[in-house]
Image (cartoon, helix red, strand yellow):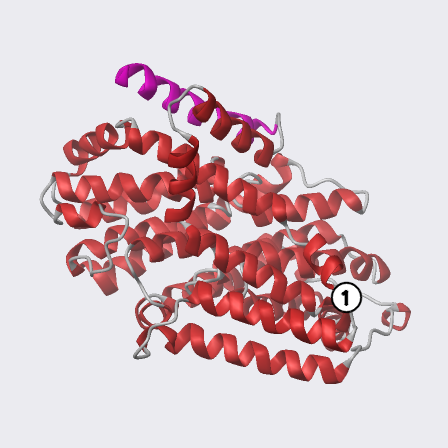
Amino acid sequence: MENISSIIAASVFVTVIGLIITDKIHLTIAALLGALILIFTHTLTLTEAIGYISKSHATLVLFFGVMVLVRAFEPTKIFEYLATQMVLIAKGSGKMLLLGIIAITTPICAVLPNATTVMLLAPLIPPLAEEIGVNFIPLLILMVFVANSAGLITLVGDPATFIVGDAVNMSFLDYLQRLSLGGLIAVASVAIITPILFRDIWNTKFTHLEDLPHSKVNHPRMLALGALIMVFVLSFFIFGDSLPVPVSPAAVALMGAALALLLAHHSKIDTLHNILRDIDWSTLIFFMSIFVLIGGLEKTGVITSLSGLLAIVLGKNIFFGSIVLIFVVGLLSSVVPNIPLVVAMVPLLKEYLVNVGLAGSEVLNPDFAGQFPPEVLPLFYAMMFGATLGGNGTLLGASSNIVAAGIAEQHGREISFKTFLKYGLPMMGVQLIVSAVYLGLFFLF
């Protein structure tokens, strides 16, 4: 019976990933159906499935809170205003326009999930680009590269980063001290290669700036109060875990969302119903379903079997293992969406560490709140960088890529797999090499 359950769990997971890669079914529907098949075949009980979702509650709560927080202040039109100002400041220079996209996207993605940032900013690019006579497809692709790279600057910038960081009990402040430099280097590598990848726009001089819409900020008083809420959220992101009574980033995001809802409702700039209606429930359901699918692999012993194989290949060589992981996970992440990939890899890596004696069996306990041995952490760092930057390789690699493609389609153009690959493959290659050098210099040598 155990063998049959293992076969079912593995087959369902591989099928779901295949459906997501080929885009045969919407990724949320594919993942949800896969999770339900495990329940209906008694591979998992409903109680066990909910239990696996609850183990990853921090990820779900964090992104729900940030989604609400961002949506609550949409009526202020602050993002439309910033996009227009970016084009005006460029003063007709394609080079300045590209650098402006990098400059605006980077700080926003450092504090908001990258897919959420793309949802906010990407719809503003096509109409602005058409007004000044520039092809908006390369601009959207550049924004995605920056969003994915800037997601490494903080713990909350990318779902994959947060999932791995949460798995090793890393605080927001710990991440800033240890890994933010790597995120900044990733963004810098985008800026350095931009003149080569986007040379046509880089050398362009555009006109018709007078035709741009004159965007202005609405509800400035509410925006000022919203800025105070963001300061509160960011402050507790940084220092919450070090308080006498620790406050997790997920709890902080939820409090920020509640304050934003209160402000929006009290000021009547929007209704509670409209805000909650516009939340990206599809992504949250996708997360929950993926956690159930990985739970099925964990319960049936598939993860344990794969970890044994990893132990044979890598042994106890942390340096070799880290370099292999950053490239293997990066390449996998270019064809498999990085969220399910890291959700699957985290328990696999933990099992491997226990199998080879680099960590005690207590790290496998979902309630483990201690620290991992410092010498094994580069393996998790390699997974973070590989999964996040590998997402720049192809159109399927990250959720923000899919979001940008959908927005392009809404404006009558298509970002084909081949078009994205032309930009994505060299970008991914450069960034994985740079990240491997960074990890080697700072954590392995």
Locate residue 204, reporting x and y percent. 73, 62
> Residue at the spot x=49%, y=57% of the render?
61
Locate residue 135, reporting x and y percent. 76, 52
Dominant secondary-structure state across the stretch colored magenta: helix
Locate residue 30, reporting x and y percent. 56, 29
Q: Is residue 427 magenta?
A: no
Is residue 390 rendered to the left or right of residue 346? right
Mark 1, other Cα within 10 Å: few <14 / some 14–19 / many ≥20: some
> Residue at the spot x=20%, y=61% of the render?
371
Seen from the viewer's position, the closer of residues 331 and 41 is 41
Quarter of the image holding residue 100? bottom right
Residue 202 showing in the rendered view = yes
Seen from the viewer's position, the closer of residues 80 and 89 is 80
Q: Residue furthest front?
A: 47
Asked if residue 8 is positioned above or below residue 32 in the image, the reply reads above
Look at the image and give the residue range highlighted in magenta: 1-23
> Residue at the spot x=43%, y=52% of the render?
57
Seen from the viewer's position, the closer of residues 205 and 413 is 413
Mark 1 — residue?
205
